[in-house]
Image (tube, rainbow, N blue to C red):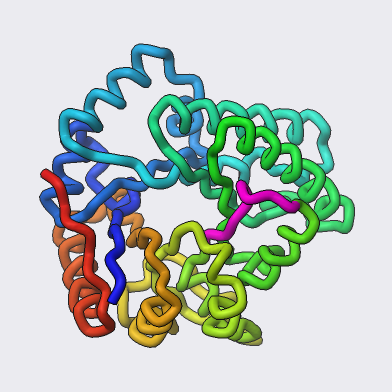
Amino acid sequence: MTINALGIYEKALPQDLSWEEKFNLTHELGFNFLEFSIDESDERLARLDWTAQQREDFRNAMWRTHSRINTLMLSGHRRYPLGSKDPAVRKQSLEMMQKAIDLAVDLGIRNIQLAGYDVFYEDKTMESREMFVEDLAKCVSMAAKKMVMLSIETMDDPFINSLTKIAHYKTQIKSPWLQAYPDLGNLSAWPENDVPAQFEDDIDTVAAVHLKDTRAVTPTFKGQFKNVPFGEGCVDFEGLLRMLVRLQYNGSYTIEMWTGDNQEADPVSEIKAAKAYFDALFNKVGIQQEEVIK
């Protein structure tokens, strides 16, 4: 048996709530923490420039509700990628990372998810790969100075879609402050991935785990990496969770959903259904959820 924290992605919740209401709802739904998003939208990128007062207000809302943020999801690098051919964009990507690290320190967040893309909207080249590695090394140096973890997520993109590829980049940047954030859905969607073997080889690099279902990539289908109902995709959650128990993984899990951002009619009901799905699986494979403090 393992004891693990279970969180919910910020984008799953109704988006018209205050932070205090979001934190309270997170607990009411039975989760230990909320995962915080800084994506490529202007609205969420603006969080990087929060004033001291805004940061204090956010911290106070967390403390009043006995809440925490385990990970800052920094998908804003899709818009400003580390591997861009444009030096001005790369400069902005590094500035974004420094701001994210400083924000994480101010908010008490210990882990920053870094999306495993060299570029997203530009063409991928050998140069984009090299720029990514060079700039990733700079990011890790920034994070190490503030003792904040950077964890590369396995993605919906062949550039970094496996723990094996993350392990390779760790040979190029040797630091305890660079780790992996595997997404069970993204890993399972790529047919070339031997997912259990990758965890067995690299469990010591895993900082956190995303719970998401996907539909697999095939020669005639590019895969579906978002909005797949749990249990209807290609992920063998029971087998993978049972394996993680055997490997004594004690880190956190986050259910990744977009029901709030999608403005679905009843996101709370969908979150409850997802929570019930994983409650049953956790009980079956021997995962005890950390007690929820309200």
Camera-side residue of 177 and 137: 177
Furthest residue to the right? 127
Q: Report the residue at 63% width, 31% height from top.
A: 145
Residue at image location 66% in from the left, 33% down from the top: 142
Residue 19, position in %: x, y?
Answer: 24, 32
Asked whether, in this view, residue 118 is left or right of residue 205, the answer is: right
Q: Position of residue 227 (x, y in %)?
A: 38, 66
Q: Quadrant of residue 205?
A: bottom right
Return the x and y of residue 221 as percentages of the image width and height: 58, 81
Question: From the viewer's perspective, is 138 left or right of 157?
Answer: right
Relative to residue 104, is residue 195 depicted above or below? below
Q: Which residues are magenta?
A: 174-181
Q: Is residue 110 left or right of residue 94?
A: left
Magenta segment: does it hold 180?
yes
Residue at 48% across / 25% down in the picture? Answer: 46
Expressed as whole percent of the image width and height from the top left, the position of residue 68 reads 29, 40
Quarter of the image that includes the C terminus: top left
In the image, 60 versus 235, the foreground residue is: 60
Asked if 147 appears above or below 120 in the picture, the reply is above
Q: In the image, is residue 105 part of the stretch drawn in magenta? A: no
In this rendering, position of residue 204 left or right of residue 258? right
Q: Looking at the rendering, which quadrant does residue 195 occupy?
A: bottom right
